[in-house]
């Protein structure tokens, strides 16, 4: 782990790989990866404007290019050092040793031993990961992640893409999501192997600045903690996949690019608890849309405002459409002494509910 952290900030292995690899080979792979990234970005843009068929088709093309680049990429320096003198993943196995000529021809025990060894080798061969999975592991992906990504990319030929958008449904949405996750994993594994010398320097500077920003943010958080905690605490009845990246605090961070997501096709509620009672003139809402896939948003909702245990006002609203760039909506409240606000999701668009911001004015 410490060596991984050091490599993240110093990129020493990436610089060493750049120095030892012939320039034509690296340039060819870099061009391949850049084409793949371009197609992936175009696919995500098409998906966000409800063009699932062409989006899936472009993403499949990007996946094919990433697969080709991964199969051609040399292993990382850390993997080579750990492997020592071990044979390459695609090296031919050594031929079976010839049977001992001194053994009697009718020795059943010797025959059983040879048969058992052969069966064990066949089983090991059958269970072995694919060549792509081996390459991805050599590039630094965890074995399980490498096998999952390889299984998705190795099945590209079997991917069904309908001809028209109207024929696309949940299966295509699942396929796009799975393929995008696999492509993201492969892209991350290939990244260090396509950096130029200038990009390596730029990454070092940017990551150093990021570290300083994190340290500064922790200092600010500590200062606020000493002052008694945040003014508003957000909680929710449920979160998509239980992942904190989609947690309720995303609606109070002032960033519309982050969102609270409910589990698939599930109503629920989010609650803001105030540090001290206050007047609420309006509740400002920014609906979500799940920016990578444009497939989640709140439809019908209710806002409940409480003073202690007493419900002092209830408001209702509706977002008729799921849009890629939701705009803020202010709902008038004009209530004093509010210490708790509950946002109840009654219905949702497409795959489930998402909410970007919920602020009190």
Image: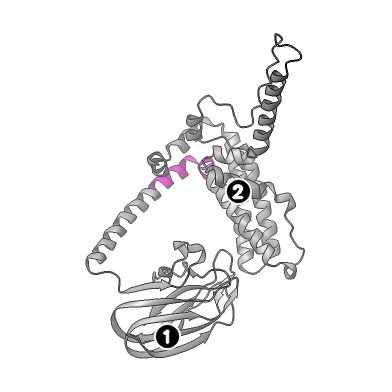
Q: Please report the residue visible at 63 percent of the width from the left and 41 percent of the height from the top.
A: 132
| Residue located beneath label 2 in the image | 149
**In the picture shown, does residue 131 fall above or below 168?**
above
> Picture coordinates of residue 138 (x, y %)?
55, 37
> Picture coordinates of residue 41 (x, y %)?
59, 58
Within the image, what quadrant is residue 224 found in? bottom left
Q: Is residue 266 left or right of residue 210?
A: right
Dot 1 falls on a residue whose secondary structure is strand
**In the picture shown, does residue 128 fall above or below 218?**
above
Which of the pair 5/270 is nearer the observer?
Answer: 270
Of all residues, the one furthest to the top in this rendering is 102
Quote the CA–CA distance across marks 2 and 1: 44 Å
> Picture coordinates of residue 193 (x, y %)?
53, 40
Of all residues, the one furthest to the left in this rendering is 226
Quadrant into which the C terminus falls: bottom left
> Magenta-highlighted stretch: main secondary structure?
helix
**In the picture shown, does residue 173 fall above or below 122?**
below
Q: Is residue 308 left or right of residue 152?
A: left
Q: Earlier in the sequence, mark 2 or mark 1?
A: 2
Is residue 195 highlighted in magenta?
yes
| Residue located beneath label 1 in the image | 304
Which of the pair 44/137 is nearer the observer?
Answer: 137
Q: Which residues are magenta?
A: 190-206
Q: Please report the residue visible at 69 percent of the width from the left and 30 percent of the height from the top.
A: 119
Dot in front, 2 or 1: 1
Q: Please report the residue visible at 62 percent of the width from the left and 49 percent of the height from the top.
A: 35
> Picture coordinates of residue 229 (x, y %)?
27, 69
Q: Is residue 339 left or right of residue 247?
A: left
Within the image, what quadrant is residue 114 found in? top right
How dense is the environment of label 1, judged by Cα within 10 Å: few (below 14), some, or many (20 and up)?
some
């Amino acid at each position: 782990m410490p060596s991984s952290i050091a490599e993240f900030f110093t990129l020493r292995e990436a610089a060493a790989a750049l120095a030892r690899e012939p320039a034509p080979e690296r340039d060819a792979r870099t061009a391949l990866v850049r084409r793949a990234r371009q197609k992936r970005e175009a696919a995500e843009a098409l998906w966000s404007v409800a063009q699932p068929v062409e989006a899936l088709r472009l993403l499949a093309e990007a996946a094919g290019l990433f697969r080709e680049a991964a199969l051609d990429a040399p292993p990382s320096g850390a993997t080579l050092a750990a492997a020592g003198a071990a044979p390459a993943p695609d090296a031919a196995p050594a031929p079976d040793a010839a049977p001992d000529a001194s053994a009697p021809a009718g020795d059943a025990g010797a025959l059983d031993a040879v048969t058992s060894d052969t069966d064990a080798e066949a089983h090991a061969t059958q269970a072995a990961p694919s060549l792509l999975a081996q390459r991805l592991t050599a590039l630094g992906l965890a074995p399980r992640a490498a096998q999952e990504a390889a299984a998705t990319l190795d099945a590209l030929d079997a991917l069904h893409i309908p001809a028209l958008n109207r024929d696309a449904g949940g299966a295509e949405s699942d396929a796009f999501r799975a393929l995008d996750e696999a492509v993201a994993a492969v892209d991350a594994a290939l990244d260090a192997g396509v950096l130029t010398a200038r990009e390596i320097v730029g990454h070092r500077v940017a990551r150093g600045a990021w570290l300083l920003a994190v340290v500064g943010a922790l200092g600010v958080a500590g200062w606020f903690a000493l002052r008694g905690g945040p003014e508003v605490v957000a909680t929710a009845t449920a979160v998509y996949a239980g992942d904190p990246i989609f947690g309720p605090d995303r609606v109070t961070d002032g960033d519309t690019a982050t969102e609270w997501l409910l589990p698939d096709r599930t109503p629920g509620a989010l609650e803001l608890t105030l540090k001290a009672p206050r007047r609420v003139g309006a509740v400002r809402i920014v609906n979500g849309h799940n920016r990578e896939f444009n497939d989640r948003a709140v439809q019908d909702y209710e806002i409940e405002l409480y003073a202690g245990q007493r419900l002092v006002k209830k408001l209702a609203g509706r977002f008729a459409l799921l849009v890629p760039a939701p705009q803020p909506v202010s709902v008038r409240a004009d209530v004093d002494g509010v210490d708790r606000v509950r946002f109840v999701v009654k219905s949702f668009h497409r795959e489930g509910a998402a909410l970007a911001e919920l602020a009190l004015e």
